Image (cartoon, helix red, strand yellow):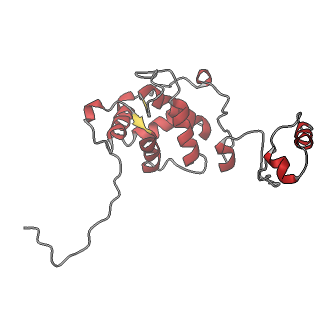
């Protein structure tokens, strides 16, 4: 009524103008995306944008994951797995039972296994996919940010499939470093004439 009075016309006119849009809803104004020749609406999977030729589909379920393939020499591979599980941990090492995504990627980088095929994106997604596998200890914990030994083997199997080679080859490449630990890169202090090591 106040608006009608301001316009100097009966409120019935304003009522009729509003009622004429009874079948419409509020108008939404937003930025309209322009044409993009790189756009592919068939898949929003990140690896498609990074050059992976055999991406993991988001539609894949845990049931479609490969089963863990146990190595011929599990002790050597497990030794590497265990060292990278505990690397950088501040908690009691006895309580650490799984490997984080950060250390899984570090494993591939330290051993020189990261390349154009096994890039950062695929390694991270292989870890995330393997974490959903219902195998091994604590596999039912969906909130866990770590993978157990069996899930680690699943992740390696996914990586081996991406490389197009048997998982035994990847197992051997990692097991060859069983006597080594994670590489630590840090700043080396230069000479200081005022330093007294006594």
Q: Quadrant location of the N terminus?
A: top right
| Residue drawn at point x = 45 percent, y = 24 percent | 141
In this rendering, the answer to whether 193 lies above or below 67 is below
Residue 166 visible: no
Classify residue 159 by image quadrant.
Answer: top right
Q: Nearer the viewer, residue 154 or 24?
A: 24
Measured as percent of width and height from the top left, residue 65 is found at 59, 25
Residue 8 visible: yes
| Residue drawn at point x = 43 percent, y = 40 percent | 174
In the image, 55: left or right of 70? right
Q: Nearer the viewer, residue 26 or 156?
A: 26
Q: Residue placed farthest to the bottom in the image?
A: 193
Measured as percent of width and height from the top left, residue 179 is found at 31, 42
Measured as percent of width and height from the top left, residue 38 is found at 77, 52
| Residue drawn at point x = 40 percent, y = 21 percent | 137
Classify residue 104 by image quadrant.
Answer: top left
């Amino acid at each position: 009524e106040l608006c009608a009075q301001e316009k100097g016309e009966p409120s019935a006119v304003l009522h009729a103008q509003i009622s004429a849009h009874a079948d419409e809803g509020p108008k939404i104004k937003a930025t309209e995306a322009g044409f993009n020749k790189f756009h592919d609406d068939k898949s929003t999977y990140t690896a498609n944008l990074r050059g992976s030729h055999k991406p993991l589909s988001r539609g894949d379920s845990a049931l479609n994951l490969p089963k863990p393939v146990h190595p011929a020499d599990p002790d050597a591979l497990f030794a590497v797995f265990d060292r990278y599980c505990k690397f950088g941990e501040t908690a009691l090492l006895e309580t650490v039972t799984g490997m984080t995504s950060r250390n899984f990627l570090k494993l591939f980088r330290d051993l020189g296994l990261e390349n154009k095929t096994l890039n950062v994106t695929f390694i991270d997604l292989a870890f995330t996919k393997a974490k959903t596998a219902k195998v091994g200890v604590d596999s039912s914990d969906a909130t866990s940010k770590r993978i157990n030994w069996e899930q680690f083997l699943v992740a390696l199997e996914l990586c081996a499939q991406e490389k197009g080679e048997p998982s035994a080859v990847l197992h051997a490449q990692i097991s060859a470093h069983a006597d080594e630990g994670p590489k630590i890169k840090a700043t080396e202090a230069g000479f200081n004439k005022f330093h007294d090591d006594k």
